[in-house]
Image (cartoon, rainbow, N blue to C red):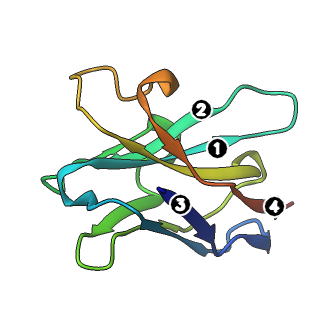
């Protein structure tokens, strides 16, 4: 049984920082890409960042320069370090696993096979 468990969300003022963690179990994730998505109220879930099995990071334009994704294959974990947070970063943040990398399609939610339950991030102005 594959499980992804996110943690680290919370309430923070604009300009603040948070570090999200996602711990995976039930599979060896060293050969998989892992990603973060987020969903704001009334909006579709959107891609935030991905870390390929090689460790190569890809970030959405809206978070470049502020967010960093990292993957620890030994701990089967992926992290999202967020700084200079803005109110528009508010939402539920989900981690997910991508069993196969398709160039240019990492934003396609349907390609991800397992998802965590999400962790709430709220940024106040």
Discs 3/1, front: 3
Please rate how many residues cluster around mark 4, counting C-alpha atoms within 10 Å: few if below 14, some from 14 to 19, many from 20. Answer: many
* Residue for badge 1: 38
Sequence order check: which comes first, mark 4 or mark 2?
2
Q: Residue 38 location in percent, x, y?
A: 64, 43
Discs 2/3, front: 3
Check if mark 1's residue and mark 2's residue have beta carbons within 8 Å.
Answer: yes
Q: Residue furthest front?
A: 1
Sequence order check: which comes first, mark 3 or mark 1?
3
* Residue for badge 4: 122
Sequence order check: which comes first, mark 2 or mark 3?
3
Discs 4/2, front: 2
Q: What is the spatial separation of the Cα atoms under label 3 and label 4, in whole angstroms?
A: 21 Å
User: Viewer-proximal residue, 15 or 92?
Assistant: 92
Check if mark 3's residue and mark 1's residue have beta carbons within 8 Å.
Answer: no
Check if mark 2's residue and mark 3's residue have beta carbons within 8 Å.
Answer: no
Sequence order check: which comes first, mark 4 or mark 1?
1
- Residue found 71% across the figure and 25% down from its top: 44
Judging from the image, what secondary structure is the residue with disc 4 in?
Answer: strand
Check if mark 4's residue and mark 1's residue have beta carbons within 8 Å.
Answer: no
Please indicate, yes or no, whether residue 4 appears anywhere in the rendered image: yes
> Measured along the vertical axis of the image, is residue 91 above or below residue 74?
above
Please rate how many residues cluster around mark 3, counting C-alpha atoms within 10 Å: few if below 14, some from 14 to 19, many from 20. Answer: many
Judging from the image, what secondary structure is the residue with disc 1 in?
Answer: strand
- Residue found 29% across the figure and 38% down from its top: 99
* Residue for badge 3: 4
* Residue for badge 2: 46
Q: What is the spatial separation of the Cα atoms under label 1 and label 2, in whole angstroms?
A: 5 Å
Judging from the image, what secondary structure is the residue with disc 3 in?
Answer: strand
């Amino acid at each position: 049984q594959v499980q992804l468990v996110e943690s680290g969300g919370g309430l923070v003022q604009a300009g603040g920082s948070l570090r999200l963690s996602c711990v995976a179990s039930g599979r060896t994730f060293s050969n998989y890409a892992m990603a973060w998505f987020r969903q704001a109220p009334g909006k579709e879930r959107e891609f935030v960042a991905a870390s390929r099995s090689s460790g190569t990071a890809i970030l959405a334009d809206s978070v470049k320069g502020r967010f960093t994704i990292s993957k620890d294959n030994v701990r089967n974990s992926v992290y999202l370090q967020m700084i200079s947070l803005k109110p528009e970063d508010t939402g539920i943040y989900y981690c997910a696993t991508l069993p196969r990398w398709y160039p240019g399609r990492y934003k396609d939610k349907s390609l991800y096979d397992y998802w965590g339950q999400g962790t709430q991030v709220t940024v106040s102005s």
